[in-house]
Amino acid sequence: MKGSQLILVVDDTLANLEVVAAALSDANFEVAIATDGERALKQAMLCQPDLILLDIMMPGIDGFETCRRLKASPVTQNIPVIFMTALSDATDKVSGFNLGAVDYITKPFQEAELLARVTTHLKLHYLNQTLEYQVEQRTAELNEALQQLQRSQLQLVQSEKMAVLGQLVAGVAHEINNPVNFIHGNLTHVQDYAEDLLSFVEVYQQHSDKSIPELRAAAVTFDLEFIRHDLPKTLASMQIGTQRICDIVRSLRSFSRLDEAECKAVDIHEGIDSTLLILHHRLKNKPEHPEIQVIREYGELPLVECCAGLLNQVFMNLLANAIDAIDEVNSKRPFEENQANPGQITIRTSVVDNQWVQIAIADNGAGIDPKIQQRIFDPFFTTKPAGKGTGMGMSISHQIITEKHQGKLSCTATPGQGAEFTVQIPIRQHVGVLR
């Protein structure tokens, strides 16, 4: 309890005020006085006493009405009130307790009893306030712990989803890889065989009896001249197609990184490019807008020690958000305007102070309102419509960069002028950080 406590004494009899005030002062209490209910209410609002000794029988508003008004005000409702009265009727006392009083002192009173009751109720009030504060503190701690648990659970779910996605991607890539390699490898032989057969047909035609009607009819029926020119083109386009599939499979395997150690020195550009290849379908021409341009301004980067799969997850979130921001702008403009001002994503990489690798991903999309920029890395926060996002992508990305890689993730944005997210991670990680 605080050293000097203030007691407000309310009584219309000056002799009573003097006796009570003297007893309290001798006991080292500060004392304020009031001679009626109206003055008591004003004093209580002004000086916020620790306890009120309140006479019942007073002119104007009596003690009961004064107590009722004290308990009705948020400012004074928690101040303990002890009635001072010569009334002995139990009904009057019950009425006082129902109004919120904590005790009665019967006139004429004994000084020892007065001090004992005042001291006891001050201690009880202090203990009650302390308990309420502790309960509030504990409740706040439990609420924070619950929110942290919910964040951790959702982050775990998201991480598990990404792990499952990585396994699925790696599995699909593995299953596709063998047959595609078989087809792609054999196409070279098929092309050689086709060229040999066409050469043979040409030689055969030159040295065969041109008067044979069946040969002339077959050449016309099968359009031999067209086949001779089109077959090599068809085989070449098939080779381009299978090479494209091989590139996609390689990117899928690179993105998942499940066939490698969790953390190792990797080529950052390879991770970015593999992520772009996976998102290629979202960059292509659409009826409402032309292709989103990707501008690569890659610097000379060393191999970087990192968890490649997790870092690719960050690239996926940042690039997907950039595409979303551009799509938001494109959806509000006519095609002609989108064609004149196409969406662009610029990716810049560089080395900073020979210790950090920096990756900046900028778009010319909708930008971000300054009021919400400080919240974009908060768990569950999203500006997307319901069902379009969990609000965890940027939070998890921030956690991956700052906690897993001891790096930095920041954002600069202007509404209507796009946004730029900058990732910085150390080129070399401290032992034990990546685990």
Image: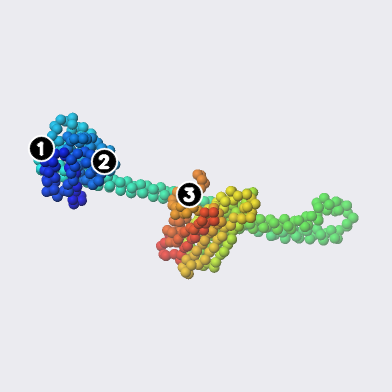
The spot of residue 246 in percent (x, y) is: 61, 57
Q: Residue at x 20, y 49 (%)?
A: 1
**Residue placed farthest to the right in the image?**
211
User: Alpha-carbon distance for marks 2 and 1?
Assistant: 28 Å
3D distance between C-alphas at marks 1 and 3: 69 Å
Mark 3 residue crowding within 10 angstroms, few (<14) / some (14–19) / many (20+): some
Mark 1 lies on residue:
108
Q: Position of residue 432 (x, y in %)?
A: 41, 62
Label 1 element class = loop
The C terminus sits in image quarter:
bottom left
Q: Earlier in the sequence, mark 2 or mark 1?
A: 2
Q: Earlier in the sequence, mark 1 or mark 3?
A: 1
Who's the residue at 19% across and 42% down the image?
34
Comparing 89 with 323, the one in front is 89
Which residue corresponds to the image point at 47% horizontal and 66% vertical from the top-left?
356
Tag 2: amino acid: Gln
Residue annotated with mark 3: 382
Q: Is residue 300 left or right of residue 80?
A: right
Q: Are marks 2 and 1 in contact (CB under 8 Å)?
A: no
For the residue carrying disc 1, how many other residues have a C-alpha within 10 Å: few (<14), some (14-19), or many (20+)? few
Q: Position of residue 109 (x, y in %)?
A: 11, 39
Give the CA separation, mark 2 to mark 3: 42 Å
* Residue at image mark 2: 77
Residue 107 at x, y percent in the picture? 12, 37
Is residue 126 or residue 222 the one in the foreground? Answer: 126
Which three-letter amino acid code belongs to the residue tagged 1? Answer: Pro
